[in-house]
């Protein structure tokens, strides 16, 4: 259990410059993806009938899942709250967009999904840095050794 908690709430990297850089990346890409989710939410009625359904759960459910991945998870990513758990749906959404929805499109049309995917995977690996809400959980956990 301790290993799972350390994975979910990492303490490192502690370097201030690295943490500020990670915060900037979280803010930039989190807000960008958040705006996509808000646009989908605001146009829910218009999009729900024809939204792609790659999982076979229906267009409306697929749209709700995309909105949750782009809005709720973006907020977790931005604030560093349940950071790695928030990134999983975001990575999944970008995988579906890049590999399924835009599969036959030229790279220029699926490039944005690819950029998000790469950034989110790299951010998943490195962690949120020390300017994240998860740090409030990670520090007490690291002292319980």
Image (cartoon, grey):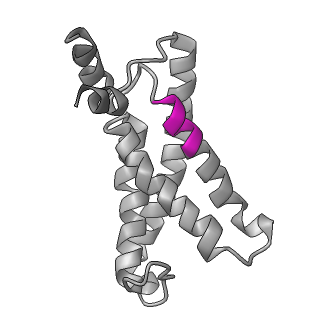
Q: Quadrant of residue 43?
A: bottom left
Along the viewing direction, whichever of 23 and 105 lies nearer the viewer: 105
- Prevailing secondary structure of the magenta residues: helix
Residue 45 appearing in the image: no
Q: Quadrant of the C terminus?
A: top left
Q: Quadrant of the N terminus?
A: top left
- Name the residue: 69% across, 74% down: 103
In percent of width and height, residue 18 lies at 56, 18
Along the viewing direction, whichever of 72 and 122 lies nearer the viewer: 122
Q: Quadrant of residue 109?
A: bottom right
| 122 inside magenta stretch | yes
In percent of width and height, residue 140 lies at 22, 15
In percent of width and height, residue 97 lies at 58, 68
In percent of width and height, residue 138 lies at 29, 21
- Name the residue: 51% across, 11% down: 16
Along the viewing direction, whichever of 39 and 30 lies nearer the viewer: 30
What is the span of residues highlighted in magenta in the rendered image?
Answer: 121-127
Along the viewing direction, whichever of 81 and 43 lies nearer the viewer: 81
Residue 76 appearing in the image: yes
- Name the residue: 50% across, 79% down: 54
Q: Is residue 123 left or right of residue 140?
A: right
- The count of marks equals 0
| 45 inside magenta stretch | no
Please say if 40 is above or below 24.
below
- Name the residue: 44% across, 18% down: 12
Q: Is residue 122 left or right of residue 137?
A: right
Please say if 131 is above or below 82.
above
């Amino acid at each position: 259990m301790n290993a799972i908690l350390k994975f979910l709430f990492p303490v490192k990297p502690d370097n201030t410059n690295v943490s500020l850089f990670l915060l900037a990346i979280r803010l930039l890409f989190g807000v960008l993806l958040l705006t996509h989710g808000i646009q989908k939410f605001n146009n829910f009625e218009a999009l729900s009938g024809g939204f792609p359904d790659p999982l076979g759960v229906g267009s409306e459910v697929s749209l709700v899942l995309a909105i949750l991945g782009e809005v709720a998870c973006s907020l977790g990513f931005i604030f560093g709250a349940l950071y790695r758990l928030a990134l999983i749906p975001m990575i999944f959404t970008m995988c579906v967009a890049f590999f399924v929805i835009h599969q036959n499109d030229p790279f220029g049309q699926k490039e944005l999904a690819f950029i998000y995917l790469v950034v989110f995977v790299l951010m998943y690996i490195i962690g949120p840095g020390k300017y994240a809400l998860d740090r409030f959980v990670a520090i007490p956990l690291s002292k319980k050794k």
